[in-house]
Amino acid sequence: MKTPADTDEPRWLTEDEQRSWQAYVQASMLLEDHLDRQLQRDAGMPHVYYGLLVKLSWAPRHRMRMTELAEAAKITRSRLSHAVARMEKDGWVRREDCPDDKRGQNAVLTDKGLKVLQDTAPGHVTAVRTAIFDRLTPEQVEQFGTACRIIADGLQPAGADLPWLR
Amino acid sequence: MKTPADTDEPRWLTEDEQRSWQAYVQASMLLEDHLDRQLQRDAGMPHVYYGLLVKLSWAPRHRMRMTELAEAAKITRSRLSHAVARMEKDGWVRREDCPDDKRGQNAVLTDKGLKVLQDTAPGHVTAVRTAIFDRLTPEQVEQFGTACRIIADGLQPAGADLPWLR
DNA sequence: CCAAGATGCTTGAAGTCTCAAGCATGCAGT
DNA sequence: ACTGCATGCTTGAGACTTCAAGCATCTTGG
């Protein structure tokens, strides 16, 4: 249960850090819960699935390799497999063999999937805006984004495309 | 699928907002994943459960009413019920009838639970620090915390203790 | 005191996610 | 061409969460 690094007394969080950390944990809990509920109610899908549809809609020809999509959405391939399986049942997404790599699969956004996304987007954006951006000044938005970017960058495997460094 | 409010074209996110939003989504995904993995590996529990043990350890006499605990941790009562059931099996928490309200239950942190928490805390704090606080300036920590607090406040039912207003 | 509704918590089923394992294909070195 | 390992993706089982429903206890108004 202990790694060598843990045996030394760690640097605990300062009071300020503790407060910010608790604020983050609460915000992220409430936010995920809020958006999941909103999307489940209005579109019958969890927030992550919505994100997947969005990524696909942004992609050229509305299709992406599974691994690529998983990385873009920051989820595991396994999770994506299950998610696509589910959305395939709903007819929102279709699998397609990859021409150049017989192991590969493309996830393709269907017309039905696109329509669902278009119908759902306004309500979802409103929810996000109401929960966040209508409450923050442009400066705060920027600061919040900067912090998030730094955190995200720190957590991406140093060279996600340089696996031999890991 | 549409509520009246959705029929008007919504205010889409500006480019800056969109960027901050994507940064947040990615950061929160990566972070939850990272901490869940760390705690699962080192202590056999998901991040939420760790949070519950922490709240209990902070409470007077190491015990809290179920509803109180659920609200503190920003999770549903149902989720808490399942979580406590699981941790009760592990012997980390014990249920106790509430003296003044026969419907009520207290969740009580056991000695074993406290020990698990103490053993786990250093590694977890280090993970949090490495992922976040060692990467942000004190000013950024403050700004990040402020934004999170605003978001969290906006999502708590206006008067969580004033249900008749909802 | 009683009925009716509110509150506190739990339950089971269905949905989702994780983890480890597995299959098929690609690729590098010989 | 062949072996051995890497890569791309899927699968099933078990863990966790959600949702709706349920039971028991309080509380309020008559």
Image (cartoon, coloured by chain):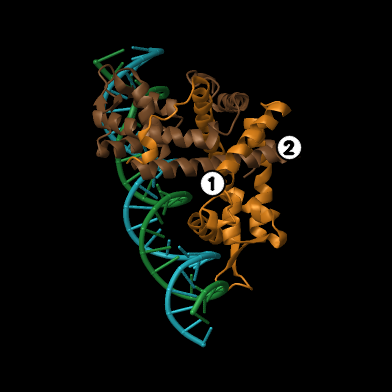
Chain colours: A brown, B orange, C cyan, D green
Q: Which residue in the structure is indicated by mark 1? A: B46
Q: Which is nearer the eye, C11 or A19?
A: A19
Q: Nearer the viewer, mark 2 or mark 1?
A: 2
Q: Nearer the viewer, residue A135 or D24?
A: A135
Element type where label 1 sits in the image: loop
Horizontal and vertical percent for residue A140? 62, 27
Numbered disc 2: what chain?
A: A
Nearest the viewer among A136 and B95 is A136
Q: Secondary structure at mark 2?
A: helix
User: Where B30 sits versus B89, above or below?
Assistant: above
Do the numbered discs 2 and 1 sit on residues whose CB atoms are within 8 Å?
A: no
Q: Which residue is mark 2?
A: A16
Name the amino acid type tagged 1: Pro
Of C19 and A47, nearer the camera is: A47
> How packed is label 2: few (under 14 Cα within 10 Å), some, or many (20 or more)?
few
Q: Position of residue B81 (x, y in %)?
A: 51, 59
